[in-house]
Amino acid sequence: DAMVIQNPRYQVTQFGKPVTLSCSQTLNHNVMYWYQQKSSQAPKLLFHYYDKDFNNEADTPDNFQSRRPNTSFCFLDIRSPGLGDAAMYLCATSGGRRWEDTQYFGPGTRLTVL
Amino acid sequence: DAKTTQPPSMDCAEGRAANLPCNHSTISGNEYVYWYRQIHSQGPQYIIHGLKNNETNEMASLIITEDRKSSTLILPHATLRDTAVYYCIVRFSNDYKLSFGAGTTVTVRA
């Protein structure tokens, strides 16, 4: 089945130690998104790619970076995780051909920072 | 972007219809109303969306008032698996962004 896959589902890192989360999709969608969801809060968009064009949200900290080497894969890099970065990180995709296209979400990666 | 207002929580009996309200009084003419839900520890799941007309799919029905200032998501026969946080979202007319609000926590009880 076509889907959005996130690995790993659970990630533990140490304070200040760089960590990379990955997302892949078999939907051949143009747009890929990264959301952060802290405990008991709604998902919050960090950034998105339309094809290779990167679009950062104004309030996304510089500590968060992203890479999209090809259509199928997108990575979230946290350069120096702090305790406040512990959250669920959600990847989503959409077709991008129309602005109203549905977003399809992966299962998320839960990040713990020790 | 137009903001939405939803009740923080509601209970529903299994097998009954669940009616989830959403206010979006500042919605503009070319903004769609979307509904997503998030079951605990999973990613959000698309349910339905609409512009002006009522919409129905295999999951739910969406009723939008004529003035478009509010809408209701209807789950026709709620099951225990429908327990989730339901988000009503008004989509930017020219952006790809989904701006999630606090949502409604729906608990379906046997």
Image (cartoon, coloured by chain):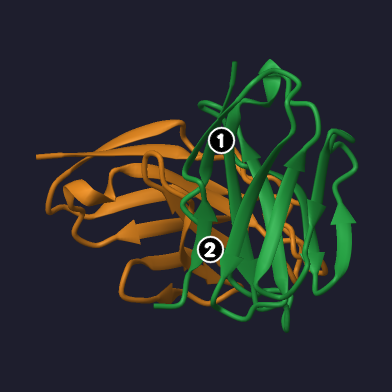
Chain colours: A green, B orange
Q: Nearer the viewer, residue A30 or B13?
A: A30
Of pointers 2 and 1, the one earlier in the residue sequence? 2
Chain containing the residue with disc 2? B
Q: Amino acid at mark 1?
A: Ala
Which residue corresponds to mark 2? Answer: B65
The residue at 64%/46% (across/down) is A21
> CB of mark 2 within 8 Å of CB of mark 1?
no
Mark 2 Cα within 10 Å, few/some/many (few <14, many 20+)?
Answer: few
Chain containing the residue with disc 1? B
Q: Nearer the viewer, residue A4 or B81?
A: A4
Total marks drawn?
A: 2
- Percent of width and height locating residue B85: 42, 41
How far apart marks 2 and 1 lie (CA) works out to 22 Å
Where disc 2 sits, the SS reads: loop
Mark 1 Cα within 10 Å, few/some/many (few <14, many 20+)?
Answer: some
- Percent of width and height locating residue A30: 72, 77
- Percent of width and height locating residue B81: 23, 50
Which residue corresponds to mark 1? Answer: B102
Q: Amino acid at mark 2?
A: Thr
Q: Is residue B49 visible?
A: yes
Q: Is residue B32 visible?
A: no
Quarter of the image for residue A52 reads bottom right
Which quadrant is the C terminus of chain A positioned in? top right
The residue at 71%/54% (across/down) is A75
